[in-house]
């Protein structure tokens, strides 16, 4: 059995976010999370299921006392998922990033779709960008609150 890779996620709490492709809107949300996702070649559906569970349960929204005690499920927020292979860029050598750690589209696209499906099944309205397209992403970062998550071998690390 191949060793699991690492789903890499940059999660931003937003008051709004949108993706356009060639001036065409393809996904937009109000308050919630913008989720940028990089998939490695050995990542699997278990990793994205764990990522979805973590995203759904993160308490990053303010309660009545102003403390981050509410999840996206508690607030009725939305998620916008954008595939971003550049999160896996290796810049240790030279000046041009290497993207050899990024999964091929045949591997990554179904896992991005699975992540979106898991969030929808959890009851979170979820939109996506367009896989493989040159996308323009607009967002208003709320806080700002930004986290980096890595899921490997079915565990958040």
Image (tube, grey):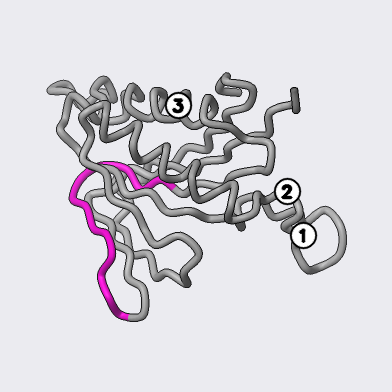
| Magenta stretch holds residue 27 | yes
Residue 5, by quadrant, is top right
Please identify the residue farthest to the right as the structure is shown: 93
The residue that appears at 40% across and 29% down in the rendered structure is 52
The residue that appears at 64% across and 22% down in the rendered structure is 153
Mark 1 → mark 3, Cα distance in angstroms: 27 Å
On the image, the x and y values in percent for residue 128 come to: 34, 53
Quadrant containing the N terminus in the rendered view = top right
Image height of 57 relative to 96, above or below: above
Of labels 1 and 3, earlier in sequence is 3
- Give the left or right position of residue 156, taking residue 117 as reference: right
Label of residue 98 in the image: 1
**Disc 1 on helix, strand or loop?**
loop
Mark 3 → mark 2, Cα distance in angstroms: 21 Å
Label of residue 101 in the image: 2
The residue indicated by pointer 3 is: 49
Judge the density around disc 1: few (<14), some (14-19), many (≥20) Cα neighbours within 10 Å.
Answer: some
- Give the left or right position of residue 84, taking residue 15 as reference: right
Which segment did they paint magenta?
23-35
**Tag 1–tag 3 contact (CB < 8 Å):** no
**Tag 1–tag 2 contact (CB < 8 Å):** yes
Quadrant containing the C terminus in the rendered view = top right
Label of residue 119 in the image: none
The residue that appears at 20% across and 45% down in the rendered structure is 31
The residue that appears at 48% across and 45% down in the rendered structure is 110
**Disc 2 on helix, strand or loop?**
loop
């Amino acid at each position: 059995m191949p060793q699991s890779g690492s789903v890499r996620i940059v999660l931003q709490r937003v008051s709004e976010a949108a993706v356009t492709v060639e001036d065409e809107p393809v996904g937009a949300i109000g308050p919630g999370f913008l989720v940028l996702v990089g998939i490695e070649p050995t990542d699997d559906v278990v990793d994205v299921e764990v990522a979805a569970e973590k995203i759904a349960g993160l308490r990053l929204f303010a309660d009545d006392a102003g403390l981050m005690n509410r999840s996206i499920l508690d607030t009725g927020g939305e998620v916008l998922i954008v595939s971003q292979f550049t999160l896996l860029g290796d810049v240790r050598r030279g000046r041009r990033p290497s993207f050899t750690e990024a999964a091929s589209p045949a591997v990554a696209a179904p896992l991005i779709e699975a992540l979106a499906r898991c969030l929808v099944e959890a009851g979170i309205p979820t939109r996506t960008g367009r896989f493989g397209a040159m996308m323009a992403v607009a967002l208003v970062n709320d806080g700002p609150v930004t986290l980096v998550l890595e899921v490997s071998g079915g565990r958040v690390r």
